[in-house]
Image (cartoon, rainbow, N blue to C red):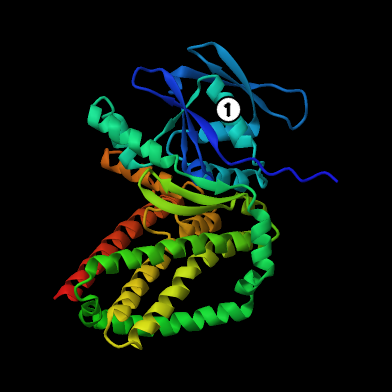
Amino acid sequence: MNQPVAPRRAKLELLVRRDDQAFEVREIPSALAYLGSRPQRVTDEAYELAHLESRVAGQRNWILKNRDTDRFLLLSDPERFLWEQMDGSISLEEMATAYVLTYGEFDFEIIPNLIRKLQRAQLLTMTPTSRLRRVLARNRRRPAVKAIESVLVLLERATVSSRRVHPIFVRLYRWGGWLIFTPAAVVVALLLAVAGLVAGATVIKNAEIFAAGFGEHPVAAVLAVKLLFFATVAAHQIVHGLALIHYGRRVREFGFTVLHGFIPTFYVDVTDVFMAPRRARVVTAVSGAAVHLVLGSLCFLLAVRSPQSFTQAFAAASGMVQWQAFVLALYPFCFMEMDGYHVLVDLLGVPTLKHDAVAYIRSLFRGGGLGRMNREKAMWLGYVALSTASIGAFIAFNVWLVFKAVS
């Protein structure tokens, strides 16, 4: 009996333009980094795109020419759609979502194959995925900056992952993971959320009393809270994977990576959820974030029922961190593409909402003018306004909480 072939690792070799205009190849080691990368096509003057007439009914093809090298590529209509998305500001995850919403289906190989084809024709480069990396790239000629960038690249390669985790997730689901997706589990989570909200209000009201429990061990407290949070990030991703099993989809990869070179995190490749109904995509997003809600509630309840001690202060601080993580994960208006943002764009059918909204606001600051208001522009303005106000409120709340705890 033939053994099933393991799915290909979701990674890609990227063609990156150096300062001397030559190219170098860099490998993206994880599905998380792969999905967050942003392909950048060459400038409009460097290519030409023409429609190729076809006598076959319903079939449309395009010819893409590199004017510098006189190389020609034949693109299908879906490939032409993806090419138009590759302006350096849209991530591959957003691109895949846009593809599903436009064509109603998704081929996991179409984007990697197209990128490889475009790279060979020198029609595509990659922009850094974070603002820090973009700043470093602009100052790469300086030895100190080049050294920092080299360290970040090295850290990004510190990825431990496996493509053979699907059977493990299947077993976890059979051994009790299925309970997470039962109506009883939803009721328990809601009851814990209500109880945690009441307990959390008590903790916030008496923050200085709870903080006093750390005593002379503030460094140990911070490390303990961070370690617990790091463990719950892994649990968050595992629940995402269990949700895929619940809906009969495949977990393609699970692992650990250093995002942007300095943010250690766990990840799970849930791209197979594109093939499931919208309800499955929403449940997959929400269930992972619910880990922070449940654990945060338990921490608050422990804090209000414990005597003043390191344990009480640790529980109170962990509850705050977990609940903030829950809000950040599901709240869509914060300029971050977290679970809640993906749910929002899925419901709206606008996979590039943040990109379009930010681009529109930038055009206003450059004197572009509001123009005639329509539903799309109102949505952009609303997203930016809510995100800006939310970030301000989040920062103000944390500053107030710190002052209250130390006063």
User: Which structural element holds mark 1?
Assistant: helix
User: In the image shown, does 338 or 50 lie closer to the viewer?
Assistant: 338
Question: Hey, which residue is sitting farthest left in the picture?
Answer: 407
Dot 1 crowding, Cα within 10 Å, few <14, some 14–19, many 20+: some
In the rendered view of the protein, which quadrant contains the C terminus? bottom left
In the image: residue 399, left or right of residue 315: left
- The x, y position of residue 378, in whole percent, is 40, 54
In the image: residue 118, left or right of residue 394: right
- The x, y position of residue 288, in whole percent, is 52, 64
Q: How many marks do you count on the picture?
A: 1
Residue 58 vs 396, above or below: the answer is above
Residue 164 vs 14, above or below: the answer is below
> Which residue bears the numbered disc 1?
116
Residue 319 shows in this picture:
yes
Q: Residue shown at 54%/34% (left/top)?
A: 12
Residue 330 vs 70, above or below: the answer is below
Question: Hey, which residue is sitting farthest right in the picture?
Answer: 1
Q: Residue shown at 39%/78% (left/top)?
A: 299
Q: Residue shown at 54%/42% (left/top)?
A: 95
- The x, y position of residue 264, in whole percent, is 40, 51
Residue 182 vs 330, above or below: the answer is below
Q: Quadrant of residue 379?
A: bottom left
What type is the residue that disc 1 sits on? Arg
- The x, y position of residue 360, in whole percent, is 36, 44
Q: Residue shown at 59%/59% (left/top)?
A: 241
Residue 276 shows in this picture:
no
